[in-house]
Every structure is written in structure tokens, then in C-alpha cells.
């Protein structure tokens, strides 16, 4: 389910993204995860299998890597290996879906729009509670509102195809809502990867 959501979202919103510019919540503003601070806070749990590599395995499991570049700088990467999938990716998909709903309210049922909005709020709360450092939900919701408003465009409606609308309906279905609920029931760092 999670791979299907991420893959389909990438395909579905590609038209909207290309029409409106790059869309990415990861690593910006309140969505920035302080990986250096995370490594410092969990120093006792960090393993160093190579001189230029440190690894932190967190609950989930979420595996976080810190690699030293040849220029001395640090690069971080994180992969959610849980059965629930990467919540950062889910948050992005839900934000994009809500932007489409805002752009094209007459193309999605009111029930579907309500369920997508509810899922977004639940994912936002999860993100606020589990990111590092923790954030106030008002910060996350404000950033999402700004993102959705900026992404919403009536011009994108003309580019929507039936398959894309079916995906939005599917994402808002009761079975998808249950899957999202299960994913958000397991606290873990809300990283972006995997997000195909």
C-alpha cells in the first residue's frame, strides 16, 4: 500500500508540479530535521563502522547515516524501514493532494476532501510530535497551509486526468484511511525515504 501511494503520487502530481515549479517540503523551515543534533542527543547509540561513516538506528526502525565528505562537510541520509513507510513522504503526498482539492474543489467529492484533510492533520500532528527537534503543531499546520495555498492553482485542474482523480478518491477511501492510521500508530522519525 505505502509503495503504491508514493509511486502513484509521484505520477499523479507530476503534471501539477511541472506546471507550478518544484514541490518539496523536506528539509525546509519547520520541516528541517536537525540530524547533527539528533546524533549529538543519541551519541551513546551511534556506531561508526568506517572512519567517514556513523550510523544511528532509531525506533521504527529508521536508519540515519552521517557521512563525512572529502571536503570535510557532513551529509545525512535517513531511511524508514518500518512497515508503515516514511511519514515525511506521506505528509508530502497528503499536502499535494490537499492542494489539488483546493485547486479543483468541484472535481473531488466533499467526503473525499474531508478525509484527505483529516489525514493531513493527523500526519501533521505525527510530524510535530516525532521530528527532531519536536515542533509545535501550529508551526507545522501554518507551513502546510502556506504550502497548499501556494500550490493551489485552477490552471492545474485542466491537466488532471481521470486516473489522477481516481487516485485522490482511492487515497481518501476508508481502506487507505485505515492504512494511514496504522502507519501513524508507530512513533518514529518522519523521514522522506523511501518515497518513490
Image (cartoon, helix red, strand yellow):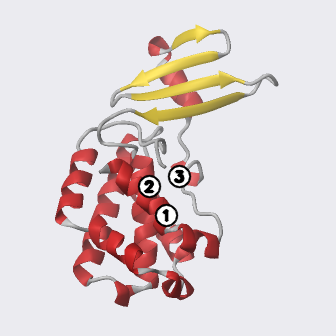
Contact, mark 1 vs mark 2 (Cβ under 8 Å): yes
Residue at 41 percent across and 73 percent down: it is 164
Question: Between marks 1 and 2, how big is the CA–CA gap?
Answer: 7 Å
Which residue reaches farthest bottom? 106
Question: Between marks 3 and 2, how big is the CA–CA gap?
Answer: 25 Å
Which residue is denoted by mark 3 in the rendering? 30
Q: Earlier in the sequence, mark 1 or mark 3?
A: 1
**Residue 29 as seen in the image, left or right of residue 135:** right
Question: Between marks 1 and 3, how big is the CA–CA gap?
Answer: 26 Å
Q: Is residue 135 above or below residue 124?
A: above
Nearer the observer, 161 or 156: 161
Contact, mark 1 vs mark 3 (Cβ under 8 Å): no
Nearer the observer, 160 or 120: 160
Q: Residues within 10 Å of mark 3 (few under 14, many from 20)?
A: many
Q: In this view, does 144 lie above or below 29?
A: below
Any mark on residue 27, and which?
Answer: none
1 or 3: mark nearer the eye: 1
The x and y percentages for residue 3 are 37, 49
Q: Looking at the rendering, which quadrant does residue 111 occupy?
A: bottom left
3 or 2: mark nearer the eye: 2
- Kind of element beneath mark 1: helix
Residue at 74 percent across and 24 percent down: it is 69
Which residue reaches farthest right? 71
Residue at 65 percent across and 69 percent down: it is 21
Which residue is denoted by mark 2 in the rendering? 7
Task: Tell me, yes or no, if residue 153 can be seen here.
Answer: yes
Task: Tell me, yes or no, if residue 141 can be seen here.
Answer: no
Which residue is denoted by mark 1 in the rendering? 11
Amino acid at each position: 500500500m505505502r509503495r503504491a501511494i508514493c509511486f502513484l503520487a509521484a505520477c499523479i502530481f507530476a503534471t501539477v508540479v511541472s506546471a507550478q515549479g518544484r514541490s518539496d517540503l523536506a528539509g525546509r523551515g519547520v520541516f528541517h530535521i536537525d540530524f547533527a543534533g539528533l546524533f549529538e542527543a543519541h551519541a551513546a547509540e551511534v556506531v561508526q563502522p568506517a572512519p567517514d561513516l556513523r550510523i544511528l538506528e532509531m525506533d521504527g526502525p529508521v536508519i540515519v547515516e552521517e557521512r563525512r565528505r572529502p571536503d570535510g562537510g557532513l551529509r545525512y541520509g535517513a531511511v524508514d524501514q518500518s512497515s508503515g513507510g516514511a511519514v515525511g513522504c506521506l505528509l508530502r503526498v497528503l499536502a499535494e493532494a490537499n492542494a489539488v482539492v483546493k485547486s479543483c474543489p468541484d472535481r473531488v467529492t466533499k467526503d473525499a476532501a474531508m478525509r484527505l484533510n483529516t489525514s493531513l492533520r493527523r500526519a501533521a500532528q505525527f510530524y510535530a510530535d516525532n521530528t527532531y527537534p519536536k515542533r509545535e503543531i501550529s508551526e507545522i499546520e501554518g507551513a502546510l497551509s502556506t504550502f497548499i495555498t501556494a500550490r493551489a492553482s485552477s490552471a492545474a485542474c485542466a491537466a488532471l486526468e481521470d486516473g489522477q482523480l481516481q487516485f485522490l478518491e482511492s487515497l481518501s477511501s476508508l481502506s487507505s484511511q485505515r492504512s494511514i492510521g496504522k502507519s501513524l500508530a508507530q512513533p518514529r522519525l518522519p523521514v522522506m525515504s523511501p518515497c518513490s
